[in-house]
Amino acid sequence: MPEGIRPPSRAGRYDADVDQIAAALEQWWNGVLQLIAPLLSPDWSWLISIVPILLVIGLVGPVLTLVLIGWLHNWLVLRRGRVRYVDPAPVAPEHGPDGVSIVPANTPYCSRDDLLFPPRARVCSECHEELTVRCPIDDAVRPASQPICRACGTKYVLGAGLDPLTVRGVAGPPPGGAAVA
C-alpha cells in the first residue's frame, strides 16, 4: 500500500450505518406521531357538529330497542292462544246378546244411567252418584274413588294410561262478549 493512503477505518463505516438507522427510526417515529395527532388533538368543530347525531343514536336507539323487545315479548308470550282440555263425554257401553252391558275393566261406570265415563271421572254427571269400577284381576266391583280393590288388594290409578286428551277450540272470546284480562 502506498504510504499516503490509509485503509478506511472501521469506525467510519459503522458511524454511517448508525446514522442510517437513526434516520429510519426518526422517520418511523414521525409517521407514528402523524397517525395519533388527530386522536390527541382532534378537530373540535367537526366533533361538535356531530353531537346531535350522537344524541339521537344514544337516546332514541335504546328506546326503540326496548319497544321492539316489548312487541316481540307480546307476540311470543302474551298473544298465544290458550288451550282448554276437555274430558271426553260419557258414552253408552256395548251390550251383549242378552242385553247386559259389557263394561271394560278399570273404566268408571254408572249402572243407573248405563254410561261409561272418562278415567278421571268419579261422579256421574247425570244422577250425581258415585261411579263404580270393575277390577281386571277378579272382576270385583268397587267405587271409583277407592284406589285399592277390597277383594284382591290390587292398587290402581284410574287414568294413568290415558288416551290423548281432547282439546276444545274456541272461536272467539269467552262468553259475556269481552275478553277476560
Image (spheres, helix red, strand yellow):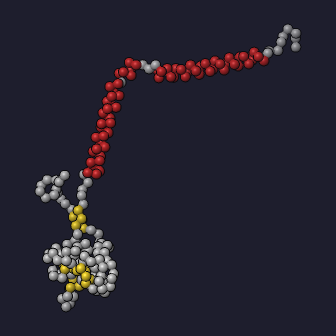
Residue 180 position within the rendered picture, expressed as x and y whole percent measured from the top left: 17, 54
On screen, 133 above or below 58? below
Residue at figure coordinates x 29%, y 73% from the top left: 159
On screen, 135 above or below 181? below
Residue at figure coordinates x 38%, y 18% from the top left: 45
Residue 96 position within the rendered picture, expressed as x and y whole percent measured from the top left: 21, 88
On screen, 156 above or below 180? below
Quarter holding residue 46: top left
Residue at figure coordinates x 19%, y 91% from the top left: 98
Drawn side of residue 145 relative to residue 15, left or right: left
Pick the quarter of the image with the N terminus: top right
Residue 53 position within the rendered picture, expressed as x and y whole percent measured from the top left: 33, 27
Whether residue 127 is visible to the viewer of this picture, yes or no, is yes
Toward the left, the furthest residue is 176
- The one of 117 and 1 positioned closer to us in this rendering: 117
Quarter holding residue 162: bottom left
Toward the top, the furthest residue is 4
Quarter holding residue 154: bottom left
Residue 91 position within the rendered picture, expressed as x and y whole percent measured from the top left: 19, 77
Whether residue 91 is visible to the viewer of this picture, yes or no, is no
Drawn side of residue 114 relative to residue 165, left or right: left
Residue at figure coordinates x 75%, y 17% from the top left: 13
Toward the bottom, the furthest residue is 98
Number of labels in the image equals 0
On screen, 27 above or below 148? above
